[in-house]
């Protein structure tokens, strides 16, 4: 499954507001999974966007355009991966995302 980085948090807000899947969503954090409806997932994603904005404002050494939020399909968002500051650095691959948010139908594809 291919994900696209979204360097602008304002663009993330636009994408989140376009979520129209009314089914169940899975929110993963620290190995725990929670089932949310579409309105709850929008609120949770907007909360995470604010957290990323705070990190970028507090940590001045992060270059402009650093991408921590990824979406599977911007035009029809059904899966997101959000990384934290520990993912930054010189590596060939990213650490596992801190949070994953996706529609329940994608659960098998999103699990390691």
Image (cartoon, helix red, strand yellow):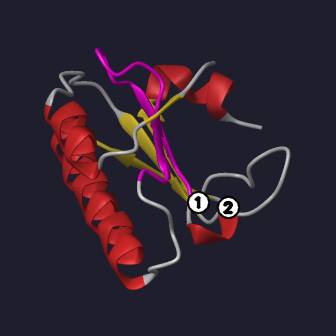
> Does 23 sit above or below residue 13?
above
Residue 5's spot in the image, x, y percent? 48, 36
Question: Of residues 66 and 37, which is closer to you in this image?
Answer: 66
Identify the mark at residue 48; answer none if there is no mark: none
Q: Helix, strand or loop at disc 1?
A: loop
> What secondary structure is found at the residue carrying circle 2?
helix
Rendered image quadrant of residue 44: bottom left
Furthest residue toward bottom: 58
- Judged from this view, the residue extending furthest toward the right is 92
Q: In this view, does 41 lie above or below 52?
A: above
Q: In which quarter of the image is the N terminus?
A: top right
- For marks 2 and 1, the one nearer the N-term is 2
User: Does 66 appear in magenta?
Assistant: yes
Whether residues under marks 2 and 1 lie with C-beta atoms below 8 angstroms apart, the answer is: yes
Q: Say which residue appears at 63% left-offset and 31% top-offset.
A: 110
Residue 37 painted magenta: no
Residues in magenta, as a range:
65-83
Disc ID at residue 98: 1
Q: Identify the residue at image location x=40%, y=44%.
A: 7
Q: Main secondary structure of the magenta part?
A: loop
Give coordinates of residue 34: x percent, y percent.
45, 53
- Decide: is 28 above or below 77: below
**Residue annotated with mark 2:** 87
Rendered residue at 71%/52% (across/down): 96
Q: How packed is label 2: few (under 14 Cα within 10 Å), some, or many (20 or more)?
A: some
Q: Is residue 9 left or right of residue 43?
A: right
**Frontmost residue, 63 versus 79:** 63
* Residue shown at the point (28%, 15%) measured from the top left: 75
Q: In which quarter of the image is the C terminus?
A: top right
The x, y position of residue 85, in whole percent, is 58, 69
């Amino acid at each position: 499954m291919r994900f696209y980085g979204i360097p602008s948090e304002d663009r993330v807000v636009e994408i989140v507001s376009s979520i129209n899947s009314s089914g169940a969503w899975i929110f993963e954090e620290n190995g725990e999974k929670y089932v949310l409806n579409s309105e709850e997932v929008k609120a949770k994603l907007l909360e995470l966007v604010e957290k990323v904005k705070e990190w970028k404002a507090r940590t001045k050494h992060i270059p402009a355009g650093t991408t921590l939020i990824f979406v599977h399909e911007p035009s029809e968002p059904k899966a997101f991966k959000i990384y934290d500051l520990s993912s930054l650095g010189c590596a060939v691959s990213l650490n596992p995302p801190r949070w994953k948010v996706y529609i329940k139908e994608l659960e098998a594809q999103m699990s390691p």
